[in-house]
Image: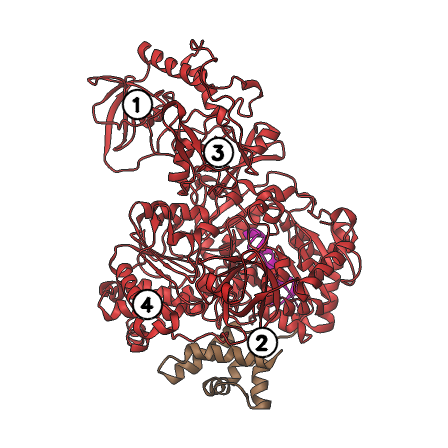
């Protein structure tokens, strides 16, 4: 339930074009066809009593409280399941109805503990409220009969309790688990009076429940209740803000008491999530006040010295003087900065501005370098804009959904729920993934095709799919003729029709049967609206950009672009990957993806910023490391990013960081990179600052400050202070002024302002004179670049090959309960589900090596070696192993190599040749890591040690 | 910077553009990519590597692209 009450229409809103007119309590009401009588009544502020109905779920009709009288009809139908009809005359209140409702409530209350004063739902309980609404004054049955009042409470879940004694068996939780989340973990056991809600005859923690919170939100009593509310009591106000985890960008209400968060509740009005959430956004926000937070600035001259806590002025002054000293000694281009997808648009904009205007070079990059930079390159090249083409709601109109190298149920769970809903409605699914992800087969979802390719062969598969489409005449000739460049198309067509791209020719390389490729291609091309969703399994390859281009080629040739239900949709890993890229975080681009060499664009920034700007591109992150090792790059400002843990080939990264003379880390925790830092500037969490995030569907949403910055300054204020200390003055009173500057200088953001976001809820860019309220679906009339451009995508095998020494291919990914490098989620109760990274290995490969489930195994590659516990599973195919990278001590990136995408230098995390063998002790790297961990902890002030 | 790494990068860039049947388009594609995305010091070093060491390890097409567009690849000099 929402504690800060929101209107609840009782049943979902209908939006159909035909309307019907009826009369409720003598008032004429016009509603879309299909609307329930309950919802129609709510529209004129007539609140019919209800318990089992809520407007996030389809009507169920079980509680018998919402009965009404309808003229000309017998009996007392439930208003939630009765559809409004033209001419209908409805009466919502009469003596008979009142008597029936009171009788029903009597039965409910006769089996309910009367502990309202000590109940955590006190003041926010629908049962309590309805007892008052129906005028319940006595319970004639007494409380001595059979009841459920002594059923034990299940407190196994770290975030909520399940108290069956308070349950009224309305099934809202079961339906939320099915309809909203699509997990089907809850069920109704027994019949009649014996009916109970059950997470599958297990406790919640060990059940299939994914802790999305939908059941807790749906519960009308205290049966399912957040432990934070049990501990702190009901909140008294709420602030709408945006989740800081994945690229779905869910809107939440931070429900507060003073400046303390009591709970985060998904916002029903959220354009991306429509009132749904996952375990991270809903529950894992406690890291914001974790004791590990560093709250005071610190400096040191060398990384072997203890940190010294200093004032903001001293820390900023020291950082600025060091940067200027380094530039004086090694040249203007010897320093740079890294922005973070975890920070706001305004913050990343300021960091790139500081680098370009105050440092005087273009050595700025962002963590998208290591995830979705190929998306920017590939989509800009083919379609003309570095962004996904659709809004999330578009999936509701998809007929064939293709998921390539993405695992939405783990990494983008709220969008996955929308996708699963559409699949349950009958849309077909094609999964392209080396691993058997959950979507391949789960309750009520089964992929028509799982193209289980070998890691590193994406381009061969996408070419084979396109080959089938073109050679079998399944392409959309009309779309191609109208929308695409004809000469580029002919060139591509000649290439793609070559026999080497046929499924039969690629089968040997990809491991995917030709028949399956042909079947999948036919389904995508001719199955109706075809929508492609992809993730880092596409981009993090030596041919990442080629694969993105291949996806765009396939969408263009089948005409699956430019309308709802289709499109090319990158699922962004972090909350503000899209935004950090939009804001000019790449070394070759100003905000809005405009090249630094463009004199007109550069002049507009020079005029606004009052400084001359560099026309040459700067260093990318991996180039910065290489330049550090050759002595030409010596200083780095890193905001909200942990490059020491997240970037590949850890040993190389650490050597580069050690070679620098001044690293300034701005973060909420003393992260792995901070071990190499000379200045630590305490950061602020998303709860402590104002700003905006832009999600994977280009939706710009507000982040609102709900508590004071623990260290005294929001991140944007720190960047301003650093710039001022460097002698390049910046002045903003509020992040809204930064957004005004972004809008002034960026054509795709021209119409964006805080005032408009507040008014509309959120805005999908482009937002300008042509599209004043934003653009949910791009490329509708024509592509941003004009004609769509087909580009030849020749398959080039990665250099990373298996050998007798390294016979297995390691690929990496994420898990639902942890987020990225784990800095946030490791500091929450989410560790109950995933406290260590493990190595998934196929039973066949395990048996060959004498490895048993749960044993320690060494994982060795050409780059390094680490040790993990084995998880023997058929989720991976023989010859392929898999792990996650959420825990630094796991050292997943000690093993990954320096191979990278040819166009963007995005690391090839997804393909590493390894050998796996039994191990009895941690790897040498892990032993050294432990030593470093202890040594660095000793260098922190006492209260900042973790 | 490590010349071998730069060589590997240029070869991979060349492999992408090389599929175009028009040789000039390939050359311009490779050089244009380096110009648009590579920091000047990296361009300077790969040109220097070609000038001084003959560009060992570069594919024939990659070498030709750098030699053909040498002037374009060398960075404009901007004062500190």
Give the Cα distance between marks 4 and 3: 44 Å
Q: Which residue is mark 2?
A: B40
Is mark 3 in CB contact (under 8 Å) with mark 2? no
> Which chain hosts label 3?
A
Left or right for A343, reference A321: left
Subunit under mark 2: B
Residue name at image x 77 percent, y 49 percent = A311
Q: Residues within 10 Å of mark 4 (few under 14, many from 20)?
A: some
Q: Using the image as rendered, state which of residue A940 and residue A510 is in the foreground.
A: A510
Please state the chain letter of the residue tagged with numbered disc 4 in the rendered image.
A
Which chain is indicated by disc 1? A
Q: CA distance from mark 1 to mark 4?
A: 53 Å
Chain B shade: brown
SS of the residue at dot 4?
loop
- Residue B73: percent from left, percent from top: 53, 80
Callout in the foreground (2, 4)? 4
Q: Which chain does the red colour mark? A: A
Quick one: label 1 or label 4, which is nearer the N terminus? 1
Labels 4 and 3: the sequence-earlier one: 3
Q: Which residues are magenta?
A: A335-363
Q: Which residue is mark 4?
A: A513
SS class of the residue under badge 2? helix
Most foreground residue, A53 or A710: A53
Residue at figure coordinates x 62%, y 44% from the top left: A287
Q: Residues within 10 Å of mark 1 (few under 14, many from 20)?
A: many
Which disc is residue A216 wearing? 3
């Amino acid at each position: 339930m929402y504690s800060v009450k929101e209107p609840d229409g009782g049943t979902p809103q209908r939006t159909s074009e035909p309307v019907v007119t009826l009369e409720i309590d003598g008032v004429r009401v016009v509603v879309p066809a299909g609307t329930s009588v309950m919802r129609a009544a709510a529209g004129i502020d007539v609140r019919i009593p209800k318990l089992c109905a809520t407007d996030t779920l389809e009507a169920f009709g079980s509680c018998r409280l919402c009965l009404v009288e309808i003229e000309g009809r017998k009996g007392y139908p439930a208003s939630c399941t009765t559809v409004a009809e033209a001419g209908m005359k409805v009466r919502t209140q009469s003596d008979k109805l009142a008597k029936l409702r009171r009788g029903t409530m009597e039965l409910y209350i006769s089996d309910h503990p009367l502990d309202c004063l000590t109940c955590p739902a006190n003041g926010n309980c629908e049962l309590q409220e309805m007892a008052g609404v129906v005028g319940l004054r006595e319970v004639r049955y007494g409380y001595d009969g059979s009841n459920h009042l002594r059923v034990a409470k299940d407190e196994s879940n770290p975030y909520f309790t399940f108290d069956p004694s308070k349950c009224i068996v309305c099934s809202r939780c079961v339906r939320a688990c099915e309809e909203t989340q699509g997990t089907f973990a809850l069920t109704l056991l027994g019949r009649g009076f014996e009916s109970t809600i059950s997470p599958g005859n297990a406790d919640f923690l060990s059940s299939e429940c994914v802790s999305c919170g939908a059941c807790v939100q749906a519960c009308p009593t205290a049966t399912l209740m957040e432990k934070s509310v049990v501990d702190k009591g009901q909140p008294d106000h709420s602030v709408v803000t945006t989740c800081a985890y994945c690229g779905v960008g869910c809107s939440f209400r931070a429900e507060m008491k003073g400046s303390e968060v009591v709970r985060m509740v998904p916002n029903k009005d959220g354009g991306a999530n429509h009132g749904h959430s996952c375990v991270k956004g809903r529950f894992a926000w406690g890291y914001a006040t974790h004791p590990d937070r560093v709250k005071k600035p610190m400096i040191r001259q060398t990384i072997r010295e203890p940190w010294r806590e200093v004032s903001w002025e001293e820390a900023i002054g020291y950082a600025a003087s060091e940067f200027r000293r380094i530039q004086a000694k090694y040249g203007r281009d010897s320093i740079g900065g890294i922005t973070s997808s975890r920070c706001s648009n305004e913050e990343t904009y300021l960091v790139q501005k500081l680098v370009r205007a105050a440092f005087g070079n273009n050595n700025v990059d962002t963590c998208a370098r290591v995830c979705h930079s190929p998306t920017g390159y590939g989509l800009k090249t083919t379609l003309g804009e570095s962004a996904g083409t659709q809004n999330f709601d578009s999936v509701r109109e998809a007929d064939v959904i293709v998921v390539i190298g993405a695992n939405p149920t783990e990494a983008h769970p709220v969008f996955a729920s929308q996708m699963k809903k559409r699949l349950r409605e009958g849309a077909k699914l094609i999964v392209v993934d080396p691993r058997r992800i959950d979507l391949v087969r789960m309750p009520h979802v089964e992929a028509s095709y799982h193209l289980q390719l070998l890691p590193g062969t994406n381009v061969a598969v996408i070419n084979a799919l396109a080959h089938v489409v073109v050679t079998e005449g399944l392409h959309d000739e009309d779309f191609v003729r109208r929308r695409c460049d004809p000469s580029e198309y002919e060139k591509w067509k000649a290439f793609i029709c070559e026999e080497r791209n046929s499924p039969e020719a690629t089968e040997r390389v990809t491991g995917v049967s030709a028949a399956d490729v042909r079947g999948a291609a036919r389904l995508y091309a001719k199955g109706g609206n075809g929508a492609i969703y992809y993730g880092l399994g596409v981009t993090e390859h030596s041919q990442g950009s080629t694969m993105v281009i291949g996806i765009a080629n396939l969408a263009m040739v089948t005409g699956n672009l430019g309308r709802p239900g289709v499109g090319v949709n990158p699922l962004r890993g972090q909350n503000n990957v899209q935004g950090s890229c939009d804001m000019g975080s790449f070394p070759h681009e100003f905000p809005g993806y405009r090249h630094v060499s463009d004199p007109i664009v550069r002049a507009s920034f020079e005029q606004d910023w009052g400084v001359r700007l560099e026309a040459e591109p700067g260093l990318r992150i991996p180039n910065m490391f290489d330049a550090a090792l050759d002595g030409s790059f010596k200083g780095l400002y890193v905001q909200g990013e942990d490059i020491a843990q997240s970037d590949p080939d850890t040993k190389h990264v650490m050597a580069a960081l050690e070679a620098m003379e001044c690293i300034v880390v701005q973060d909420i925790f003393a992260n792995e990179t901070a071990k190499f830092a000379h200045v630590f500037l305490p950061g602020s969490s998303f709860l402590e600052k104002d700003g905006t995030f832009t999600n994977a569907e280009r939706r710009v949403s507000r982040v609102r400050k709900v508590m004071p910055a623990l260290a005294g300054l929001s991140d944007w204020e720190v960047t301003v202070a650093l710039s001022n200390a460097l002698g390049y003055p910046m002045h903003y009173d509020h992040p809204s002024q930064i957004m005004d500057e972004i809008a002034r200088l960026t054509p795709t953001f021209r119409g964006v302002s805080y005032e408009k976001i507040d008014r509309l809820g959120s805005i999908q860019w482009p937002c300008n004179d042509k599209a004043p309220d934003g653009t949910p679906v791009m490329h509708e009339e024509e592509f941003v670049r004009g004609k769509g451009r087909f580009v030849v995508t020749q398959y080039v095998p990665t250099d990373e090959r298996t050998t007798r020494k390294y016979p297995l291919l390691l690929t990496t990914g994420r898990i639902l309960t942890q987020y990225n490098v784990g800095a946030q989620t490791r500091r929450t109760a989410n560790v109950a589900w995933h406290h260590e990274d493990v190595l998934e290995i196929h039973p066949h490969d395990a048996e060959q090596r004498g490895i048993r489930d749960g044993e320690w195994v060494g994982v060795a590659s050409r780059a390094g070696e680490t040790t993990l516990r084995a998880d023997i599973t058929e989720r991976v195919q023989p010859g392929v192993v898999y792990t996650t990278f959420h825990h630094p001590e796991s050292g997943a990136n000690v093993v990954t190599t320096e191979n990278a995408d040819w166009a963007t230098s995005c690391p090839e995390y997804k393909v590493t040749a390894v050998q796996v063998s039994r191990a009895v002790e941690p790897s040498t790297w892990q032993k050294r890591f432990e030593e470093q961990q202890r040594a660095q902890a000793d260098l922190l002030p006492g209260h900042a040690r973790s | 910077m490590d010349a071998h790494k730069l060589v590997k990068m240029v070869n991979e860039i060349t492999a992408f553009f090389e599929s175009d049947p028009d040789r000039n388009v390939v050359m311009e594609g490779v050089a244009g990519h380096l110009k648009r995305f590579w920091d000047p010091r990296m361009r300077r070093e790969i040109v220097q590597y070609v000038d001084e060491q003959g560009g060992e390890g570069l594919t024939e097409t990659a070498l030709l692209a750098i030699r053909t567009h040498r002037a374009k690849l060398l960075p404009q000099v901007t004062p500190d």
